[in-house]
Image: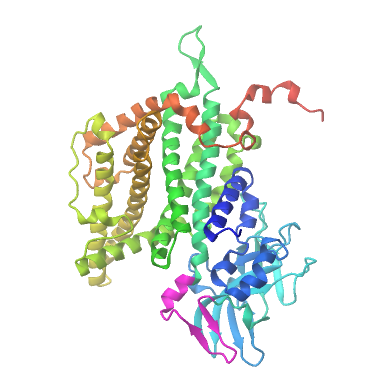
Amino acid sequence: MVPSGASIICIRWRRVKALNFKDSNLWVNQQPRGGAINFLGTKRHHDKWLNASENFQVKGCFAMTELGHGSNVRGIETIATYDIDSGEFVINTRCESAQKYWIGGAANVGKVFHSTHTIIFSQLLINGTNQGVHAFIAQIRDNEGNICPNVRIADCGHKIGLNGVDNGRIWFDNIRIPRENLLNSVADVLPDGRYVSSIKDPDQRFAAFLAPLTSGRVNIAATAVYISKVGLAIAVRYALTRRVFSITADGPEVLLLDYPAHQRRLLPLVAKTCAMSSAANFLKRLYVDRTPESNKSVHIYSSALKATLTWNNMRVLQECREACGGQGLKTENRIGILKAEFDVQSTFEGDNNVLMQQVSKALLAEYIAAKKRKHPFRGLGLEHMNDPCPVIEANPTSSTLRSTEFQRDLLTRYSSEVSRYQADGESKVNAALLTYNLLMDISQSYQLADELARAFSERTILQIFIKEETTQSPGRLKDVLGLLRSMYALTCVEEDASFLRYGYLSRDGAAAARREVSKLCGDLRPHALSLVNSFGIPDSFLSPIAFDWIEANSWSTVKDE
């Protein structure tokens, strides 16, 4: 029985999870294989390349980024010109800034992932007309690893992390490839040079060519959660065995995690990571079940969650590294290494700040379109915009602060009003002249755009986590999920001055939220070990300080030199 496409994707995600717990370099080298061919190619490409790619007979890389163009893919400078006489495309790196850069698996280091072929993204010129960015398959090495004629390859050099990935630079000196090597699911070039596409709008056609990046963002978002769990499992286990200082002169030293300050460092991050784990699962399901109609939603959610979850990952790893003191510096304890290896996620497959601007732009477009049509909001979780903004209590009690309704209302009001502020600012910018006041409007608009995207992400994660909680029957599990949900929501409130700046919380209300976070730390402390154990990370994927770190550092472990 042949597995379905959805089941294949799920199997691959389980592999990705295992690979990232242990070795991020292996996943980065595996991830691009066949993905672009599957998305952008048609049957002729699938039959010729997919099995060979999956079996490593063909080892591929993904050549989109250039020295001069990263986020701005539309502006890449590599040129592919169609030669009608020979029926070939001629691909050329026309200037130094057009060299392909950061291409994983392309460089000359190592033999296992020595790319033989690449997917080249370039501008397509036909009879002097630029048809925009298209993708092509080209061979860059033979089976013996020798670089093909008219191709030049160099290493990108040593990096702060992820050096197991041999990122390379590629120059093409008018290499020729068959017409059939154009990945033509979106558009094609006929033998006589006619350009044909079922997608007439150039912007929509360009968006279709970027579809492979969506799967990458989904993978990266999920991976960020896996790695956060590894860091937290190590740091929390260490804090449950490491003692420091005593309350009385002759008394025992106190466990690190029994100090309120240490609880404050780690337990809110445990709660946020649990909430984001639910969001990552939601994103994977959304991607597996996607339809042409849902592609826009998938893009928005994947962009927002990729940025939010990778930023959280870097914060988690830094806090865990510091929480483990000097032991956090040791390579064998993994946290510092993970921090260096996964720093790239903030800019890999889309710079996080640029992605969040795309999210805000899309949400604003939906807001303005709905207002013009005078229709209610539908989709993207924007239905709350159809209702009046909820009224927030000025002096919430502890039970109010922990209630689902209060937390949802607070984040809903923030998201709704930032959307309205942003829409008003956009209208002013469109109507104004290029004056100092316009520049101030643009500056304010950018800040509001950033806040809108963050508000959307935080509210989305909370909504998903609430849904997970409500599916549980009453009992201990549901009680703990309630604590985690409250910790997530109130930590978002405590960490963001916007709730005070826009007047959603009074100063007394903000102070009450801060006190409640401290109480929640105490409530979650008895569950700390169970929570990190529930992450399901195999012991071999953790580190010595997660177990008997005294024995791991004893003299008996010292090897003769």
User: Which residue is at a point 51% across and 59% down the rendered structure image?
Assistant: 215
User: Which residue is at a point 58% across and 79% down the rendered structure image?
Assistant: 79
How many numbered callouts?
A: 0
The stretch in magenta equals: 185-208
Residue 275's quadrant in the figure? top left
**Residue 129: horizontal and vertical position, in percent?**
50, 87
Q: Nearer the viewer, residue 122 or 10?
A: 10
Whether residue 147 is visible = yes
Q: Is residue 382 left or right of residue 342?
A: left
Which quadrant is the N terminus positioned in? Answer: bottom right
Q: How is the image coloured?
A: rainbow
Q: Is residue 202 magenta?
A: yes
Which quadrant is the C terminus positioned in? Answer: top right
**Residue 236: horizontal and vertical position, in percent?**
51, 30
**Residue 92: horizontal and vertical position, in percent?**
63, 79
Q: Nearer the viewer, residue 174 or 295?
A: 295
Residue furthest to the front in view is: 1
Height in image: 225 above or below 113?
Answer: above
